[in-house]
Image: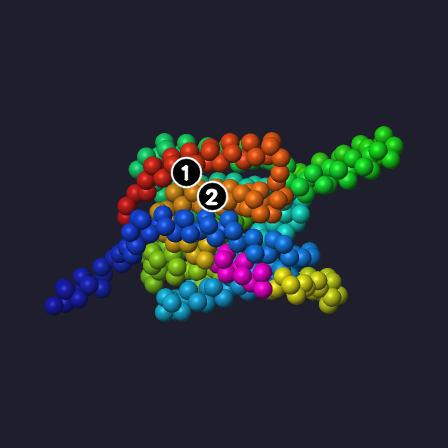
Amino acid sequence: MDLLIDNITSTTILPPTQPYPIWVGYLSVIISVLFFGSNFVPAAKFPIGDGVSFQFFLCCGIWFTGVIINLILDNPPFYPLVIIGGVLWTTGNVLSMFVIPINGLGLSMLLWGTSNLFIGWASGHFGWFGLKSEGVEVPIFNYLGVSIAVLSGLIFLGIRSQQNQSLEEDNLSSQLINSNSDEKSQLSKQNRMRLLGCLLAIISGVLFGLVFTPSTYIQDHHEKYPLSTKNGLHYVFSMYTGILFASFFYFMIYIIFKKNQPYISIQSIFPAFLSGIMWGIAQAGFILANSILSQAISFPLISIGPGTLAALWSILYLKDIRGKRNYLIFTIGTVIRIIAAILIILSKPISN
């Protein structure tokens, strides 16, 4: 009897098993792409001013979604470490507010989507930041798919949004009435603004790519977190709480900077909240897909999809991407991304 008790108490705690089949992971990818690519559309035609107040109400919508998911799941354990992921996302989101006015919505999402793709894929596949490396059945397809996806991002850089064109027209007008030295100054300013917009978008993408690192770390180290599960949805509320806290912090700094006179557009409050709900659904699909398919599969698929869909919204609805040249670049880039997605899917995740 004593031997039996010793065997029971000394048994190694087994890692949790995945509660969902593979097809649920791919369904989560589709849901995530649709909502990520469309979540800013409800607010696209409303005034948001400098965007700081807008992002706070958006984060309120995200947290509300997290509360609903948490209640549906019967209040799983709260993981403070996952809060860091939420803080990283909010910081990237604040940076993105400076990017969109420069590059436009579609191009901005394509830029940060590419850097997000690489960081998220590489950290999972190679096991960066303490994560366990995640293999696939056909690595060559995975490498080719990710490489082609990154290449498609470079192709999309050729798209010129209406924001860029307006800036260039303003600069050209000023050049016609200024001296040669002023012309060089204006051209230099234009190039600096475009470079700054691209750089901030890439930094945002890097931060976005690290969002899931804390939750994946917990899932990979069951010996440290015995209550952890492989259900990605169990980490949603912790992440969304970090998002709300960080957003509130940045909003308070903004209010102090504005001397208690923040710009708040009443018209944009509900659209921001609705955008937050859509983003919350998309992120829940993302984290669930990560836990089922692995980041080596889900990250590339979800990173390339929303940017393409957002560019399509920009063409058909927002009208800030126009012209045959832009349409041709979009078509070529989209075809290449479809090829990349097919290769990534064919690389197949290794079953747990």
Residue range of the region highlighted in magenta in the rendering: 270-280
Q: CA distance from mark 1 to mark 2?
A: 9 Å
Tell me which label, 1 or 2, sits earlier in the chain. Answer: 2
| Residue furthest out toward the left | 1
Label 2 sits on residue: 305
Three-letter amino acid code of the residue under disc 1: Ala
Residue 154 makes an appearance in the image: no
Q: Is residue 163 left or right of residue 129?
A: right
Label 1 sits on residue: 341
Q: Is residue 300 magenta?
A: no
Is 190 in front, or is 240?
A: 190
- Please name the residue shown 85% across and 30% down the image: 180
| Residue 94 badge | none
Image location (x, y in percent) of residue 136: 33, 39
Image location (x, y in percent) of residue 167: 73, 41
* Tags 1 and 2 touching, CB below 8 Å: yes
- Magenta-highlighted stretch: main secondary structure? helix
Element type at mark 1: helix
Q: Is residue 4 left or right of residue 219?
A: left
Image location (x, y in percent) of residue 66: 46, 64
Q: How many marks?
A: 2
Q: Is residue 312 above or below residue 325?
A: below
Q: Is residue 271 magenta?
A: yes
- Please name the residue shown 43% across and 43% down the image: 301
Residue 262 appears in which quarter of the rendering?
A: bottom right
Residue 324 makes an appearance in the image: yes
